[in-house]
Amino acid sequence: VKDIRILAIESSCDETSAAVCINGKILSNFIANQTVHEKYGGVVPELASRAHMQNIVPVADAAIKAAAAKIAQAPGVGHPAFSLQDIDAIAFTQSPGLIGSLLVGVQFAKSLALALDKPLIAVHHMQAHVLANLIAEPKPDFPFLCLTVSGGHTQIVLANSPYDLKVIGETIDDAAGEAFDKSAKLLGLPYPGGPLVDKYAKEGNPLAFKFAEPQIPELNFSFSGLKTSVLYFLQARKKEDEHFIEKHMPDLCASVQYTIINILLKKLKKAVKETGVKNVCIAGGVSANSGLRTALAETGKKHGWQTFIPAFEYCTDNAAMIAITAYYKFLNNDFASLDASPAARA
Ligand code: KG4
Ligand code: ZN
């Protein structure tokens, strides 16, 4: 049987990434982070597109070279020497994302496909986040549930197979990562505030302050009320003591984090109950949160779930997850044409 070698590109938001996989095994995964956005307090689409333009060729080149070096070092595995010419397909993120960012990745992939005369594979970014759980052992068996939580998305997906992913719940307003970042901003922390909230929360009491938890039907989420609740709470307390935030930073962060985790886990428990599926994964940048990781493990233990979290480099935006998804699409003969175009929403 012939090896299947895929070069995958991810450029949906503010990371430029390229990965190579062979038969579904990741050989390289390069990610160029864009730091240009920090001083603006959020991702600036125009600047993101320009940074992708600068990064995409060097990042793809690095991914190919690293994969070639890995294969050269391990002749025992029986793969022949490898270079760009030996790629069997080029995969790219088609949607959803910032349109200018997506365009850079799509155009790069199409140009390469044309030059090498190799097929294209179009990948849905959110499906890829879910299938990141199939990159490394231990992997969940199908069916499994995946809570995908990042700066741009919050979803619960029921995965019946790599080809049958069903969104059974999602946010109706802000994403979980936005809830972290917007609360952090109200606390005077720099963007992106999620990791800092995590850091301070470790020293604080999660029950010190109580913030509003929304009552949203079914398996959907809402986070915009939390932001308002934190805002009003801080306004009232600052009237009494202008140094309130500085004095209570750990307790504030721990309480905000506790509220967000509660909102997430409540719906995850409901999803397990409704589907009867007890293989439970999380993915996305917010799955780096230490409180969420602990809470998932504890909840899983208590309710007899098998829980899974991909390695951190496969949780945040990365091309390895695009590559693994493309591998399954390749097996299914699911190729895109040269006139494929990106979509901001899909
Ligand atoms: O997946 P990601 O890197 O990018 C996308 O949004 O697609 O996720 C970034 C989000 C940001 O909102 C960031 O604040 C949040 O993940 N995040 C965290 C932590 N690390 C990253 N939130 C809470 N605790 C963390 N440790
Ligand atoms: Zn993402």
Image: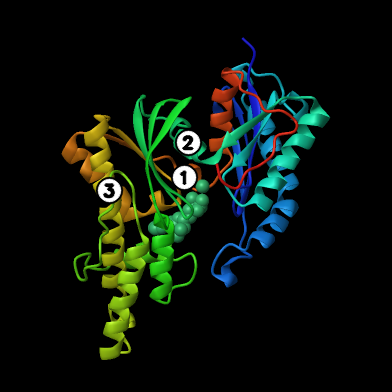
Residue named by callout 1: 315
> In whole angstroms, how far apart are the C-alphas of marks 2 and 3?
28 Å
Kindly check if marks 3 and 1 are in contact, taking CB atoms under 8 A apart as contact: no
Q: Are marks 1 and 2 in contact (CB under 8 Å)?
A: yes
Q: Residue at x 41, y 32 (%)?
A: 166
Whole-number angstrom distance, CA of label 1 to CA of label 2 = 7 Å
Q: Is residue 256 toward the left or the right of residue 327 in the image? A: left
Residue mark closest to the camera, 2 vs 3: 3
Q: Place residue 159 in its image quadrant.
A: top left
- Is 295 located above or below residue 229 in the figure? above
Residue 63 % position (x, y): 67, 39
Give the residue at mark 3.
Answer: 217
Residue 145, percent from left and from top:
34, 34
Q: At numbered mark 3, what does the secondary structure look like: helix, strand or loop?
A: loop
Q: Is residue 40 above or below residue 310?
A: below
Q: Amino acid at mark 1?
A: Cys
- Residue topped by disc 2: 132
Residue under the point 80% across and 27% down = 116
